[in-house]
Amino acid sequence: MSEICVVMAKEEYEPWRHVFDAAALPVRYALLEDADTAMIDGVPHDARTLPANVVWMTVQGFRGPLRRTIKHLLENAPDLKWVHSIGAGYDMPILQDVLARGVRLTTSHSNAISISEFAMRSILGRFQQVEERRVARENKEYPRHDFREIYGTTWLIYGAGAIGSNISKRAQAFGVHTIGVRRNPTGTEPFDEMIKPEQVADHLGRADIVIMSLPGNAETANLVDAEFLARMKPGATFVNVARAGLMDEAAVLAALDSGHLDAAILDVHTIEEAWLYRKERMDDSPLWTHPKVDLTPHAAAHGSGRYVRTVDLFIDNLRRFVAGDPRLPDEV
C-alpha cells in the first residue's frame, strides 16, 4: 500500500466517495471526523499526529471546526509535501505559512464560473434597475422607463486570471469592449485589449465598469484609493469580487456620495472580514443601507456547479502528484 497519506474533512469526502473510489489512486485517505479523530481504512487515529503528505484545504480547514487541527498539521507534519486549497487566492496567513515551509501549494479556479455569472447578474441588475422595479411592484405601481444597456460599454477588469477571463468572455458576448490588466500579458488572454498595472491610470477614464479580480497582498493593499476613484469615468460602476483590502472603503463611499460613481457592487468588504476573522458584527456600517451599494457576503463563488468542479480538479491534481508531476496546474 502506498505511503501517501491524504488528509481531508470526512464531511467533504463522503458526498464524493464514489468519485474517489472511481479514481482508484494508490493513496490512503485520512478522514477527519472531528478535531481529535481521523479514520484511515476504518481505523481511528490521533488527528494531530497523522502522517500527512497531502492536505486538501476546504472550508473546514479555513474557518470550520477542524481549523486548529489542520493548522497544526500544516505547521508540524514532518512529511507534508503538498497542500491543495479550494480558494483562488493564497493571501491567507495559513497558506502563507505553507509556502514559508517550502511545501507545494495549489489553488483552485473552480469558482471562476460562479463569480463571473455573479458579476454579470449584478451589473445587469444595476443597469436594468431591478431593485426599483421590485419596489414599484410592492407599491402596486406600474412605471415604464428606459434602462441602460451594457452593449457598447467598456469594462476594465483588473486581474486577467481565470476569474477576470471568465467575466470578459461573458461580457464580450453582450457586445462589451473589455480591457484586461495583468503584470505580464501573454497575448492569449480573452480580452479586446491588454494593459499593465502601470498603464491603468491612463485608461480608467474610458471604463463604464471597473472590476477588481486580482489577488490581495502588500502590493495591492488600498490600490483603489481616492486618486484611483477620481480617475474613473463619471457615472461609472465599481465592482469588487476579490478582497476588501484592495479598496479604501471610505473613499469608495465618498465617491458614491459625491455622485462621481453611480454604484458599487461589493461582494467583499469590511463587514464580511470583521465577521470572518473576528466574529464581530458591524451593524452600524453605512454599507448596509447605502442606496448605491449592492452588498453580498463574499458569496459570488457559491454557484451550484462549483462542487463537482472542485472535486474533479483535486483528483486530477492528486493523480498528477502521485505520478510525480514536477508542476501542478495552478501551483503557486
Image (cartoon, rainbow, N blue to C red):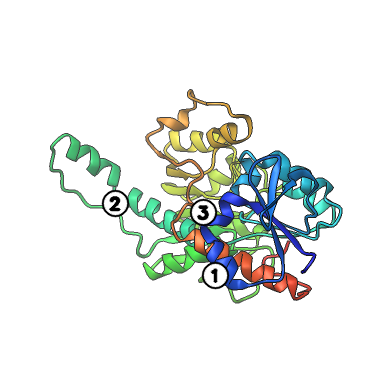
x and y percentages locating residue 51 in the rendered image: 80, 54
Image quadrant holding the N terminus, namely bottom right
* Viewer-nearest residue: 126 or 36: 36
Image quadrant holding the C terminus, namely bottom right
Q: Quadrant of residue 181?
A: bottom right
Question: Who's the residue at 77% across and 64% down the image?
Answer: 4
SS at circle 2 = loop
> CB atoms at circles 1 and 2 under 8 Å apart?
no
Is residue 4 positioned above or below 217 on the image? below
* Neighbourhood count class around disc 1 (C-alpha, 10 Å): few under 14, some 14–19, many 20 upward: few
The answer to which of marks 3 and 1 sits earlier in the sequence is 1
Question: Who's the residue at 18% across and 40% down the image?
Answer: 137
* Neighbourhood count class around disc 3 (C-alpha, 10 Å): few under 14, some 14–19, many 20 upward: many
> CB atoms at circles 3 and 1 under 8 Å apart?
no
- Please tell me whether mark 3 or mark 1 is closer to you in this view: 3
The three-letter code of the residue at mark 3 reads Ile
Disc sitting over residue 211 in the figure:
3
Q: Is residue 230 left or right of residue 153?
A: right
The answer to which of marks 3 and 2 sits earlier in the sequence is 2
**Residue for badge 1:** 193
SS at circle 3 = strand
Is residue 124 positioned above or below 319 on the image? above
**Residue for badge 2:** 128
